[in-house]
Image (tube, rainbow, N blue to C red):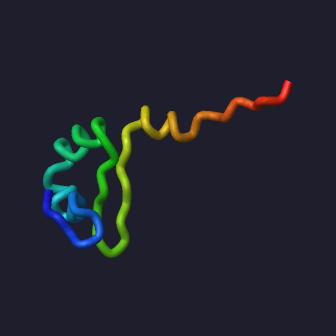
Amino acid sequence: MMPNTQYEDAWTISEAKAKLSELLRCADERPQYIGARKPYVLISVEQWEALNKPKESMAG
């Protein structure tokens, strides 16, 4: 991965396109940042579901 100023390990858009399979494998391990000016984050479905799991209520 090519470093950039905002996120040291961010992928460039062209690099992400060229190495999509590698990018997806890396996303299984941890979030992957793509782009510099307008960054995006790629995460696995498991990570997404964990982040969006309904919170259990402490009430009754």
Residue 27: horizontal and vertical position, in percent?
29, 42
Q: Reply above or below: 51 against 19.
A: above
Q: Nearer the viewer, residue 59 or 53?
A: 59
- Res 44 → quadrant: top left
- Tell which residue pokes out farthest to the top in this image: 60
- Tell which residue pokes out farthest to the front in this image: 58
Q: Reply above or below: 24 against 40.
A: above
Q: Is residue 14 left or right of residue 58?
A: left
- Tell which residue pokes out farthest to the right in this image: 60
Q: Residue at x 43, y 32 (%)?
A: 46
Location of the N terminus (image quadrant): bottom left
Q: Is residue 48 left or right of residue 11?
A: right
Location of the C terminus (image quadrant): top right
Q: Nearer the viewer, residue 13 or 36?
A: 36
Q: Is residue 2 left or right of residue 28?
A: left
Residue 2: horizontal and vertical position, in percent?
14, 62
Q: Reply above or below: 10 against 47.
A: below
- Tell which residue pokes out farthest to the bottom in this image: 37
- Res 22 → quadrant: top left
Q: Reply above or below: 60 against 44.
A: above
Residue 24: horizontal and vertical position, in percent?
25, 42
Residue 4: horizontal and vertical position, in percent?
20, 69
Q: Is residue 38 left or right of residue 5?
A: right
Q: Residue at x 35, y 50 (%)?
A: 42
Q: Nearer the viewer, residue 14 or 30?
A: 30
Q: Residue at x 35, y 66 (%)?
A: 39
